Amino acid sequence: MENLNSYLIVSAVLFSIGTIGVLTRKNVIVMFMCVELMLNAVNLTFIAYSRYLGNLDGQIFVFFIMTVAAAEAAVGLALIIAFFNNKESVDVADANLMKW
C-alpha cells in the first residue's frame, strides 16, 4: 500500500493552490476552477483515508461531493453566463454593479 502521507501532502498542496487562487484572482471563471480544485483535494483526502482504513465510507462521501460539484458547475456556469451577457465582463469587481 502506498504511503498515506504522500496523498495527504498532495491534497494539501492542491487545496492551498485552490485557496490562493480564490483569494487572489479577479476572474470569476478562474475562481470557479479554483473552488473545483479545492473540492478535488478534499475528494483525494477522503479516498486516501478510505483506502488506508479499509472501508468504503470515504468513497461514498466522494460520490456525493462529486454530485454536488456537478450541480454547482451547472448552476455556477449559468450564473456566470448570465452575468457576462449583462455586464460584458467576468470580473469580480463588476459584480457589485448589479442592481435589482
Image (tube, helix red, strand yellow):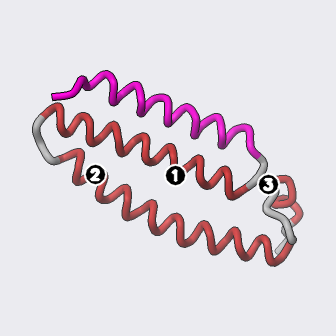
Residue 75 figure quarter:
bottom right
Amino acid type at image mark 3: Val
Callout 3: SS: helix
Q: In the picture shown, does residue 34 fall above or below 98?
A: above
Gap between marks 2 and 3, in whole Å?
31 Å
Mark found first going from the N terminus, 1 or 3: 1
Q: Is residue 55 left or right of residue 3?
A: left
Q: Which mark is residue 61?
A: 2
Amino acid type at image mark 2: Phe
Q: Which residue is mark 1?
A: 36
Is 24 magenta? The answer is yes
User: Which region of the structure is painted magenta?
Assistant: 1-25
Residue in view at x 36 percent, y 28 percent: 8
Question: Residue 9 versus residue 64: which sits nearer the camera?
Answer: 9
Can you say which quadrant of the picture contains the C terminus?
bottom right
* Magenta span main SS: helix
